[in-house]
Image (cartoon, helix red, strand yellow):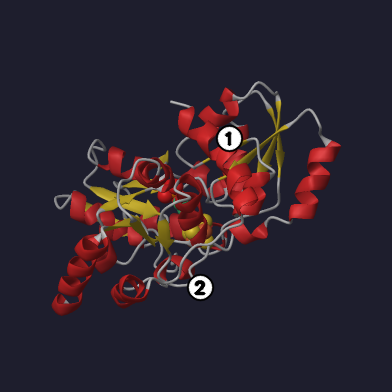
Amino acid sequence: MKEMIKEIEKLKKEKNAIILAHNYQRKEVQEIADFLGDSLELARKAASLSADVIIFAGVSFMAETAKILNPDKKVLLPEESAYCEMAEMVDVKELKKLREKYPDAAVVSYINTTAETKTLTDIVCTSANAVKIVESVPQNKIIFVPDKNLGTYVKKRTKKEIILYDGFCYVHHKLIMKKDIEKIREEYPDAHIMVHPETPEEIQEMADSILSTGQMIKQAGKIKEKTIIVGTEIGMVDRLKRDFPDKNFIPLTMRARCRGMKEITLESILNSLKYDRYEIVLDKEVMEKAKIPIERMLKVK
Ligand code: 13P
Ligand code: SF4
């Protein structure tokens, strides 16, 4: 592994490349990343880079966002099969019909969407800023795409009318269950339970805090309880343990593993640097249209 890391470092310098990684990446991938963050932090970082090559250790919508914000740079996703299953849930025809049905509504799309979905979007949001983004648009009616759980979270925190799309993340919606949170409460009655807003409403209601992955890191040090239960993808536990070695982080369930995120390995990153693969190539018109709602989001402070 040491040899592989050395080679990655050498190639990175030679190619003026930077590695951006999401908080759900494998521990060893997190350790070699130049920048690690949640979707919002990664999009902000991608908008301000000077490197020639961006290696994206994450899923395809994240690498696409980096490409849209850097059309002249080479953006590489180390594994072609690293994609977010929720992002693929939007049926573009259905979204077009929704827009026609509600012409006075704003389309707010979660960043976990394809570039094509973003071309039909007024403004993008992430789990860290969804309420703020919904509040920032002039329309009182919102078509919220695609995560119904994040949409429900927003609905409870705004007076605006939210039209939900029937999408979800299988990791948070299906693999994190009510019985897991009931069991862990019994086992650790003094622990703080944090969950991601992609979990179902009943799970959110049973938790102590509902946070994006970036917010989990910001809050972990402030939480008084020494034991913190992490209700999101298991990679987050490694991230938190490294930043807060004095606290005790326990995954809500070990089932919460995102296949797409775990596709990326050190070996695939090395091959990505060696062979320039897999380059993100998007249609120019799609990139130009998709950039508008992403930039609108980045302007909201
Ligand atoms: P964050 O933006 O909170 O990191 O979430 C991204 C994601 O894919 C959650 O499943
Ligand atoms: Fe997509 Fe869910 Fe994986 Fe996040 S955890 S990247 S929402 S499939």
Q: Relative to 175, is 211 on the left or the right? A: left
Residue at 37% from the left image edge and 59% from the top image edge = 24
Q: Using the rendered image of the protein, determine whether residue 177 is visible from the camera's viewpoint.
A: no
Under mark 1, the amino acid is: Val
Residue at 41% from the left image edge and 59% from the top image edge = 74
Which quadrant of the view contains residue 114? bottom right
Pinpoint residue 258: horizontal percent, then vertical percent.
46, 66
Question: How many numbered discs, if any?
Answer: 2
Quarter of the picture containing the C terminus is: top left
Q: Using the rendered image of the protein, determine whether residue 221 is visible from the camera's viewpoint.
A: yes
Which element type, helix, strand or loop, lies under badge 2? loop
Residue at 66% from the left image edge and 59% from the top image edge = 89
Q: Outermost residue, front direction?
A: 72
Q: Would you place residue 113 above or below residue 48 in this image?
A: below
Q: Relative to 169, is 216 on the left or the right? A: left
Under mark 2, the amino acid is: Ser
